[in-house]
Amino acid sequence: MIRVENLHKHFGGFHAVDGATLEIAKGSITGLIGPNGAGKTTLFNVIAGRLPPTSGRVLMEGEDITGLPPHDLFHKGVLRTFQIAHEFGSMTCRENLMMVPAGQSGERLWNAWFNRARVAEEEARLRAKADEVLEFLTISHLADERAANISGGQKKLLELGRTMMVDARIVFLDEVGAGVNRTLLNTIADAIVRLNRERGYTFCVIEHDMDFIGRLCDPVIVMAEGKVLAQGPADAIMQNEAVIEAYLGRGLKNKAAAHG
Amino acid sequence: MDIINALVVFANFVFVPGLAYGAQLALGALGVTLVYGILRFSNFAHGDTMAFGTMAAILVTRGLQAMGISFGPLPTALIALPFAIAATAALVLATDRGIYRFYRKVRAAPVILVIVSMGVMFVMNALTRFIIGVDEINFADGGRFIIAAREFKELTGLAEGLAIRTTQVITVVTAAVAVGLLFWFLGNTRTGKSMRAYSDNEDLALLSGINPERVVAVTWIIVAALATTAGVLYGLDKSFKAFTYFQLLLPIFAAAIVGGLGSPLGAIAGGFLIAFSEVTVTYAWKRVLGYLLPADLAPEGLVQLMSTDYKFAVSFAILVIVLLFRPTGLFRGKSV
Ligand SMILES: Nc1ncnc2c1ncn2[C@@H]1O[C@H](COP(=O)(O)OP(=O)(O)OP(=O)(O)O)[C@@H](O)[C@H]1O
Ligand SMILES: [Mg+2]
């Protein structure tokens, strides 16, 4: 689905992403793990068109999408969420979701004036869809709340909700679970699995919670210091010496040794 | 009777002129606030965009007059307005293409864009002066008064007259229509909502598939319409002079900042606040007080807080006070 080839992103002399090559298989829920500052978010930013790469290529099903602006990628079905949740603060949660499927008939001023019936019908459909998504995420009661006022965890849910408003092809989730309580975390995990099975979304998920990764993701990619350290099936990765060294830490290594 | 006379004097010299001036400032401030909200810089060229638009309206008005077209009791400039808006929109879109877009692409800091807009300001001002000259131009035709002071006195039998000029009524009505259209657009059309979304959070708007170049282009067209309308109304009400529009920059920015940069509602409130402050502070209250106070207390002096020469100081003072106590403005815009 997505192939990243020898991608570099430098900030001045600092190599945040340092020659990453990886593959996200179509229909998978791929995990992306690595220590803080490994360059995971930066990698997302480059793939999703928010930052231009220093060098390297990003391919989607063979097509070169390197450096395309985010709104073009959106129309190709590439969506993402932000590690630090973003929202349209002056709008309600429902309006936030209703903003997502851009490019409809209401866009044309002509239609807004003269084709009101069609615009109204679309609005109604969008609204119903938004309410459905809010319901699914268990935040229906926030529908008319201004998005600036909701909690950090709720903003995370709203971020996930955005990706459910359209038929995405691939969704990059940057720590959707961070700051969300356990029950909601399960809700999110269920949502991801359902979107993956029922609507055929491919996911790439950054997460520090190893339970979450272990339960959800296969395969898993490990990054450290801007490089891809390992990629492969979840079980193999968890056993990988280098990964344990770089990320999971000594304690786990000892535990793994004790088990082995 | 004295109280009514005092009210008439007040309406004649403070309320009606303040209302018209406030509407002009509000329209100007709306343009500034939209550019700030969407393009994220303070556009110093706004005053001269107004001047350019007014100049275009004057030229079209002259053309229409030469062809013998008039608008009855209303000024011909109102017919010229749509053409002038189109010309101004073309100019600002070309400026955006040729200049601002480059700085957007390299993600220049807002302060750089401010400086760039100063450059644009000088060029636009020179262009206007080059085409139409620096002289004062009166282009208001049609009926001068809706109510003249003498008619009012005869009608009511009061000692004081109330004059309402056609241009003042047109200013308020046109401004109300323009503001109504703008709010309808921002609140009800998908494009308007995209603009609000873009202003709220650019990154997220892009991720929602909103095309930034389109939002920017639509913004410039609206800004051109607002600036031209504001400029023409001001010119009709007072007169046109290439340099006066540059001086309007201070009260307009004061209005936008006082209301809260990026907030359309704030721009309107700010416009009226600045206009009324300016008018009340520079008005000589002697006559109003003469009616209200007993004869032996009647003031000897003019009771004018500040000479009209210092009217811009009023905007400046309000600006400083607001920035000290509420930096985001009355309607909580983006902080400056
Ligand atoms: N815009 C930027 N300018 C300069 N340095 C940056 C920028 N963005 C990221 N970095 C640096 O790049 C490195 C990688 O950051 P990144 O956010 O990609 O890490 P991450 O893997 O997402 O970490 P975390 O798990 O903490 O979210 C960090 O050292 C960071 O300081
Ligand atoms: Mg990160």
Image: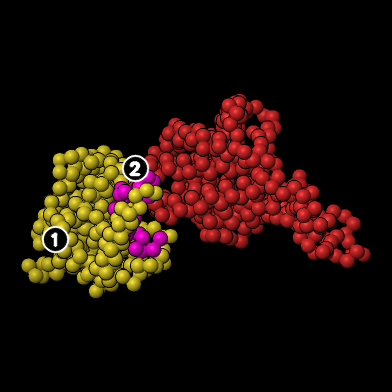
Chain colours: A yellow, B red
Residue B281 image position (x, y, % from top left): 74, 54
Amino acid type shown at disc 1: Glu
Q: Nearer the viewer, mark 2 or mark 1?
A: 1
Displayed quadrant of residue A21 = top left
User: Which residue is painted at 54% across and 60% down in the image?
Assistant: B331
> Quick one: which residue is furthest to the front in this view?
B155
Q: Is residue A222 above or below residue A11?
A: below
Q: Is residue A59 left or right of residue B336?
A: left
Q: Is residue A153 above or below residue A1?
A: below
Same chain letter for marks 2 and 1: yes
> Quick one: which residue is furthest to the right in this view?
B296
User: Which residue is painted at 29% across and 66% down in the image?
Assistant: A131
Residue A198 is labelled as 1
Q: Are marks 2 and 1 in contact (CB under 8 Å)?
A: no
For label 1, being within 8 Å of ligand 2 is answered: no
Residue A13 is labelled as 2
Displayed quadrant of residue B129 = top right
Boundaries of the magenta span: A91-112
Displayed quadrant of residue B290 = bottom right
Badge count: 2
* Cα gap from disc 2 to disc 1, whole angstroms: 44 Å
Q: Is residue A174 above or below residue B239?
A: below
Mark yes or no: residue B233 visible: yes
Q: Is residue B114 covered in magenta?
A: no
Q: Is residue B171 left or right of residue B114?
A: right
Q: Is residue A94 covered in magenta?
A: yes
* Quadrant of the rendering where the N terminus of chain B is positioned: bottom right
User: Which residue is painted at 64% across and 49% down in the image?
Assistant: B169
